Image (cartoon, rainbow, N blue to C red):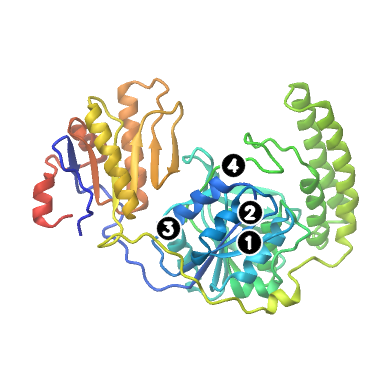
Amino acid sequence: MTPSVLPKSDVLCCVFEVARSNERRPEAGPGPSISVVINTDNRLALLKRVLLALRYQTYETFEVCVVAGPTEDGTRHYLSGIKAGLKIAHCDARNLSKSRNLGIAMAAGEVIAFIDDDAVPEPEWLAQLARSYDDSRVGAAGGFVHDNSGIDYQARFVSVNRLGFPQQDSRPTPELNFPGSPLIPHLLGTNCSFRRSALIAIGGFDEEYEYFLDETDVCLRINDAGFRIVQRQDAWVHHKYAASGIRDEQKSVRHWYPILKNRLYFGMRHAQSHYSPAEIVAGAMAEKRAWEADVSQKTNAGLLSPEDAKRFHNEAAAAEEDGLRAATEPAKLMPAAMLKKRPQPLRHFARLSPPGGQRTLVYSDAGEGKSENATDLMRSQAMEAAREGHQVHLIVASNAMPSVDFDDGLWVHDLGSGGPVRAERDERMGEAIRRIASRRWIDAIYCPTTNRALLQSFIGLPAAPIPLEAARTAGNL
């Protein structure tokens, strides 16, 4: 089918037959119903972005549950205006585990997927997570997480030990997935999913973890309950590291209490069959000293104030006392009434569904010799296609550093304008297109006519791309 927005001028050319790793467009088969839970607080603009990204998901059977935190920033008013398409709850405390339990209580999906409000999923995210649940033994699955550049990774394969300390692995580690394992496969909280029945069986999240190690605790208890944890090599999410009550926009921590307290609590709760209490405390104290050195360095550099340094020592003392005390008390799991409560039926989220189905279109605006007219026309057509619901990738060269961002429905691949010679920039363009093509079927690439030879050279296109009008006549679009 033809998208209604196609180049209507000879200024642009359409290039077909992109080199692909897949031989055909994959068809979405039946899968489990999914509830996407977003826990948000004081990030209204970012919440709007992730909700928009979810409208482009290729998976059909899912709902979205939003749990808004206590901060008055307009989020609750905004959600009340669109509540027909969402399930909404409110959390009265800045406690991520409590917020997640509220999300679980609302969720009607067979699978519950969590994504942070400062993250963006790629369109195939849910479809790829769903494939892991064909195996009834699977209790959890998660994918790769890009860092804020959108190109590099925050995490791919991670395992954690019983003290909660992570290690980066070069591959998935299913061999670690057995009850009592000293190391377990780990999933990041911004890209994790769980079979709902498994979450209910283990009692949901432990609300002692107001922040930090909350999803690690769940992964460990899922593992020890005998469920399988799947670490996928796809299901990509882009994590943008927005400022929070814990860290600033440079990821610099300014509130240390939950990190130090939960490290000690986690070890005392889960590691005593593998470590002595003295070893558990020693591990937590080693982390405290590492944070102490970090605070001292940043204070000397003027990034933290002397008052911040004093506050660190006060928080560290309280964290040690409270972590040890909490470990002697019952875990603060979901209340029994919430565990037994039957949620409202699945409320299907309104996806964008263009006539004839979603197409993947790439617009390249980063080559040499393009006219202002071509640039304006290309951007307007890319935006119009995105508004219809097509998956649109726009390649530009404007920021100082290369990046990938989701902006108003467009996936913007910035090659960076930090002075690379033309050959280097052209190679970056080829890399960007090849990266897109490696993840999904590309239906067409649009570029200024002057860039045709470039694209042929760098992505292995045929010597004579099909002219746009001929393609329409032949039914290729």
**Residue sitting at x 19%, y 43%:** 7
Out of 175 and 4, give the one closest to the viewer.
4
Between discs 2 and 4, the one toward the N terminus: 2
The x and y percentages for residue 21 are 31, 52
Task: For the residues labelled 1 and 4, say whether their Cβ atoms are less than 8 Å apart.
Answer: no
Q: Residue 403 versus residue 469: which sits nearer the camera?
A: 469
Q: CA distance from mark 2 to mark 1?
A: 9 Å
Residue at disc 1, secondary structure: helix
- Crowding at dot 4, Cα within 10 Å, few <14 / some 14-19 / many 20+, comes out as some
Instruction: Report if residue 300 is visible in the image.
Output: yes
Which label sits in the foreground, 1 or 4?
Answer: 4
Identify the residue position indicated by label 1 in the image.
176
- Mark 3 element type: loop
Which comes sooner in the sequence, label 1 or label 4? Answer: 1
Q: Of callouts 3 and 2, which one flags the residue occurring earlier in the amino acid sequence?
A: 3
Q: Quadrant of the N terminus?
A: bottom left
Give how far apart the Cα atoms at labels 1 and 4 are: 29 Å
Q: Quadrant of residue 307?
A: top right
**Label 4, on which residue?**
241
Mark 3 residue type:
Arg
> Which residue: 41% across, 67% down?
60
* Distance between mark 4 and mark 3 Cα atoms: 22 Å
Q: Amino acid at mark 2?
A: Ser
> Which dot, 3 or 2, sits closer to the camera?
3
Q: Earlier in the sequence, mark 2 or mark 1?
A: 2
Please state which of residues 164 and 87 is positioned toward the viewer in this rendering: 87
Q: For the residues marked 3 and 1, what is the alpha-carbon distance in whole angstroms?
A: 36 Å
Which numbered tag is attached to residue 159? 2
Badge 2: how crowded within 10 Å, few (<14), some, or many (20+)? many
Q: Earlier in the sequence, mark 3 or mark 1?
A: 3
Q: Residue 288 at what x, y percent from top left?
A: 82, 40
The label nearer to you, 2 versus 4, is 4
